[in-house]
Image: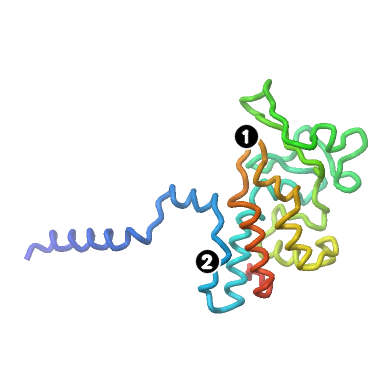
Amino acid sequence: MNWKLALTGVAALCLFVGAGTLLSPASVAQDAKTLKPAASFQSIANERERSVALFQEAGKVIQHPRCVNCHPATDRPLQGASMHPHQPPVFRGDGGMGLPGMQCTTCHSAENTPVVGQADTIKSIPGNPAWHLAPIEMAWAGKSLAQICQQIKDPARNGGKTMDQIVEHMAHDELVGWGWKPGAGREPVPGTQAEFGELITAWVKSGAACPAS
């Protein structure tokens, strides 16, 4: 028996059988840009495990730079996919609207504004009627998904919101929704706001369990 040929055949068979379970880099990249529907988690029988899985999927939005940039751990917002400190230097101020003379509305209008002169580096300026930083109590930058989860559930740190109000905020708030329509030159958060809202709703209904770490 030619063992070399036999082993080659076994290796080929393993590759063929395993091909369906291996994800290509393109598949992984695409997965990062989409959200699994909340209904797809119903197959997880253990309610706590299902709840954690739902929040981890929603975490693809929560921990995306579009969201974390407005939830900084300091009084200075972040920018870009690299989440670098905002340029020009601006600071939180009252209500997260910036300091006098350098408020958010100095540059950010009610809608995204295309930029022509700096199109190679800056293609648009973000805009929304309610543009402002999240309260410092809701800082997400530098925190694990587990820490953010506990923070979202804590009325002392979430603006006094009930879990039903958290669902409403995530699913329908227009400033949250900006993450899916961030303007030219920016990657939107995964999925849609409706899909994200369904994940948060299902998470709350299943007990709002948080990841262990």
Q: Which mark is residue 151?
A: none
Question: Would residue 23 appear left or right of 2 to someone viewing this image?
Answer: right
Camera-nearest residue between 147 and 95: 95
Seen at 65% across and 53% down, the residue is: 193
Q: Percent x, y for residue 108?
A: 79, 35
Give the secondary structure at mark 1.
loop
Amino acid carrying mark 2 in the image: Ser
For residue 18, what is the image quadrant?
bottom left
Mark 1 closeness class: few <14, some 14–19, many ≥20 residues within 10 Å = some
- Residue that lies at the very extreme toward the bottom in this rendered image: 46
* Percent coordinates x, y for residue 82 in the rendering: 64, 42
The image shows residue 31, relative to residue 163, as above or below, that is above
Name of the residue lying farthest toward the top: 117
Where, by quadrant of the figure, is residue 142 drawn?
A: bottom right
Q: Nearer the viewer, mark 1 or mark 2?
A: 2
Secondary structure beneath label 2: helix
Tell me which label, 1 or 2, sits earlier in the chain.
Answer: 2
In the rendered structure, which amino acid carries the disc numbered 1? Gly
Image coordinates of residue 75 in percent, x first then y, are 82, 46
Q: Position of residue 20 (x, y in %)?
A: 34, 60
**Relative horizontal placement of residue 132, taking residue 171 as reference (left or right):** right
Residue at mark 1: 185
Q: Is residue 35 above or below residue 97?
A: below
Query: Tag count in the figure?
Result: 2
| Disc 2: which residue | 40
